Image (tube, rainbow, N blue to C red):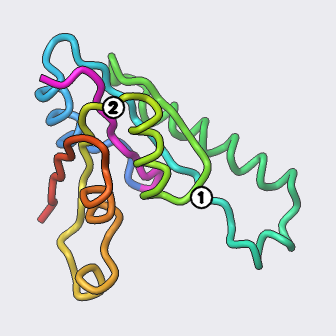
């Protein structure tokens, strides 16, 4: 069983019941689950035109939304970081001693084979086990 499990969360999708079930199963009775949302900042060229206050409010709103989506899921800790999605997931796993990452993935299209999806990049670079649930 894994002691520390990371479940990346996209706010537009929320916390998948299937990935949460997988994480709970892999963690057993003593497993600790962290639901992580990566809040991406605008590209540098766009950022020059965006007010800093607006970016701060956007982060705060994302944090509130994350906590709302986690509400009612006992034993799940909500965390939010800023950065690039796959890199931030890997960095969080390294920094916090994560044993396993459980994440969902869509059915790959041609673009994913050429560029690689977030899940594929996490699988390639993660410092720990990764369990990918592929929805149909």
Q: Which quarter of the picture shows residue 43?
A: bottom right
The local secondary structure at tag 1 comes to loop
Q: Position of residue 10 (x, y in %)?
A: 43, 52
Where residue 79 sits in the image (x, y, percent)?
51, 33
Q: Is residue 112 above or below residue 26?
A: below
Mark 1 crowd level (few <14, some 14–19, many ≥20, 10 Å Cα)? few
Q: Quadrant of the N terminus?
A: top left
Q: Image quadrant for the C terminus?
A: bottom left
Q: Nearer the viewer, residue 57 or 84?
A: 84
Q: CA distance from mark 2 to mark 1?
A: 21 Å
Residue 67 in the image: state x and y as whole percent: 51, 31
Q: Is residue 18 left or right of residue 84?
A: left
Q: Nearer the viewer, residue 71 or 116?
A: 116
Bounds of the magenta span? 1-12
**Residue identified by numbered label 2:** 98
First along the sequence among labels 2 and 1: 1
Query: Which residue is located at x 34 percent, y 81 percent?
Result: 115
Q: Secondary structure at mark 2?
A: loop
Whether residue 27 is situated above or below residue 116 in the rendered picture: above
Disc 1 target residue: 40
Q: Residue 97 location in percent, x, y?
A: 37, 28
């Amino acid at each position: 069983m894994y002691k520390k499990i990371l479940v990346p969360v996209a706010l537009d999708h929320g916390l998948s019941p299937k990935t949460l079930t997988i994480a709970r199963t892999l963690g057993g009775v003593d497993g600790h689950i962290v639901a992580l949302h990566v809040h991406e900042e605008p590209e540098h060229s766009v950022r020059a035109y965006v007010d800093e206050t607006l970016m701060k409010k956007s982060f705060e709103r994302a944090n509130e939304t994350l906590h709302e989506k986690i509400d009612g899921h006992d034993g799940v800790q909500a965390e939010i970081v800023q950065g690039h999605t796959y890199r931030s997931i890997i960095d969080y796993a390294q920094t916090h001693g994560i044993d396993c990452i459980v994440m969902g993935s869509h059915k790959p299209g041609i673009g994913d084979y050429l560029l690689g999806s977030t899940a594929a990049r996490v699988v390639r670079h993660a410092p720990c086990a990764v369990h990918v649930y592929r929805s149909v």
